[in-house]
Image (tube, rainbow, N blue to C red):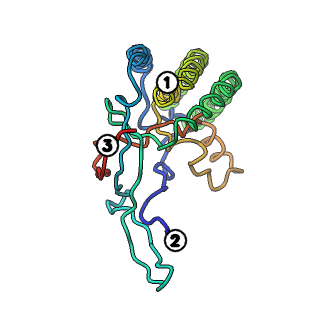
């Protein structure tokens, strides 16, 4: 019997502070539009170069120990079935490592990855238009919220005789609305491109599972603006009082990603200080 200790599974970003409601919220790992286009191009180039690359030469299985957010090694309690004595042992994690980048992926078998790729290719056909519809709806909601908040703030300042501050608040609100509209339009246009890329990578993954998983992860990370899978909406806390208007508007504005295949995302890199390589072996 064992139970993991330390910070394993504790997701970062659960407690975030937000500035003015009129400000555009951004995750710390956001990629700029230019960077996203460049990475899509480099991903396509890397995909073509991998066609003649064997799985055995591109990936290896590694066994590592891992440190939690507190800097301590992640261990488990081992209970002796005879004596009942409990001792702590270092937990050894097994990953599939990309030889070129050092990225660590879940140690799924090639058959499991193939099955996931098939499901992913089918799911992306529905996920892509759904994402486009949601982004359009969210853009309309956010711009409406910003407009209401801007008018309220501008009106209060004007009634207090602060005309200069009132004009500044109006300008800030108009800038936020323009930024949100531009970002929303870009996300809507980007969706079918990234969706098609994910489908092609998934189909490639049926033939070469680990290669396909790697490229699908790269494309979907770009699709989600470079945000970590740990920021996924399924792993982050909701507002404590969602019924309150202020909390509700903040919740709508938060740019949480929603990964279609979060399990394809790298769990880190072997070069990270929190990993210690124990053993490496061929697949």
Comparing marks 1 and 3, which lies closer to the viewer? 3
Instruction: Give the side of residue 227 with respect to residue 136, left or right.
Output: left
How far apart marks 1 and 2 lie (CA) works out to 39 Å
* SS assignment at label 2: loop
Q: Is residue 164 visible?
A: no
Q: Residues within 10 Å of mark 2 (few under 14, many from 20)?
A: few
Q: Which mark is residue 219?
A: 1
How much space separates mark 3 and mark 2, taking CA atoms? Answer: 28 Å
Q: Quadrant of residue 254?
A: top right
Q: Give me the residue at 39% from left, 40% from top.
A: 104
Q: Measuring 39% from the left and 72% from the top, which residue is drawn there?
A: 88
Q: Which of the two discs, 1 and 2, labels the residue nearer the N terminus?
A: 2
- In depth, the one of 179 and 214 nearer the eye is 214
Locate the C terminus and report the quarter of the image it occupies: top left
Query: Which quadrant of the figure has residue 77?
Result: bottom left
Pick whichever of labels 3 and 2 is earlier in the sequence: 2
Question: Which residue in the protein does label 3 denote?
Answer: 270
Label 1: element kind? helix
Q: Is residue 270 left or right of residue 127?
A: left
Residue closer to the observer: 52 or 139: 52
Whether residue 266 is situated above or below residue 194 in the rendered picture: below
Q: Is residue 34 left or right of residue 202?
A: left
Percent x, y of residue 160: 55, 38
The numbered mark, 1 or 3, whose residue comes first in the sequence reads: 1
Q: Which callout, 3 or 2, points to the residue nearer the camera?
A: 2
Residue 52 lies in what quarter of the image? top left
Rendered image: mark on residue 1? 2
């Amino acid at each position: 019997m064992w139970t993991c200790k330390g910070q394993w599974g504790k997701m970062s970003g659960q407690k975030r502070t937000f500035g003015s409601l009129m400000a555009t919220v951004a995750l710390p790992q956001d990629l700029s539009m230019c960077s996203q286009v460049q990475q899509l191009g480099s991903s396509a180039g890397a995909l073509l170069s991998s066609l003649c690359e064997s799985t055995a030469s591109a990936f290896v299985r590694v066994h590592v120990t891992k440190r939690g957010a507190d800097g301590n090694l992640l261990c488990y309690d081992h209970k002796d079935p005879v004596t009942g004595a409990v001792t702590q042992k270092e937990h050894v994690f097994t990953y599939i490592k990309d030889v070129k980048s050092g990225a660590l992926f879940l140690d799924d078998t090639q058959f499991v990855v193939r099955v996931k790729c098939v499901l992913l290719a089918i799911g992306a056909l529905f996920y892509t238009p759904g994402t486009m519809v949601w982004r359009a709806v969210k853009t309309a909601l956010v711009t409406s919220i910003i407009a209401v908040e801007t008018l309220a703030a501008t009106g209060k300042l004007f009634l207090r005789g602060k005309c200069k501050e009132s004009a500044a608040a109006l300008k800030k609100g108009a800038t936020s609305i323009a930024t949100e509209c531009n970002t929303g339009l870009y996300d809507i246009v980007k969706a079918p491109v990234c969706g098609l890329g994910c489908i092609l990578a998934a189909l490639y993954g049926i033939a070469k599972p680990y290669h396909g998983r790697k490229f699908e992860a790269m494309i979907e990370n770009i699709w989600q603006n470079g945000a970590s899978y740990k920021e996924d909406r399924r792993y982050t806390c909701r507002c404590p009082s969602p019924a309150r208007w202020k909390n509700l508007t903040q919740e709508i504005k938060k740019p949480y990603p929603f990964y279609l295949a979060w399990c394809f995302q790298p769990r880190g890199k072997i070069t990270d200080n929190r990993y210690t390589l124990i053993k490496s072996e061929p697949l």
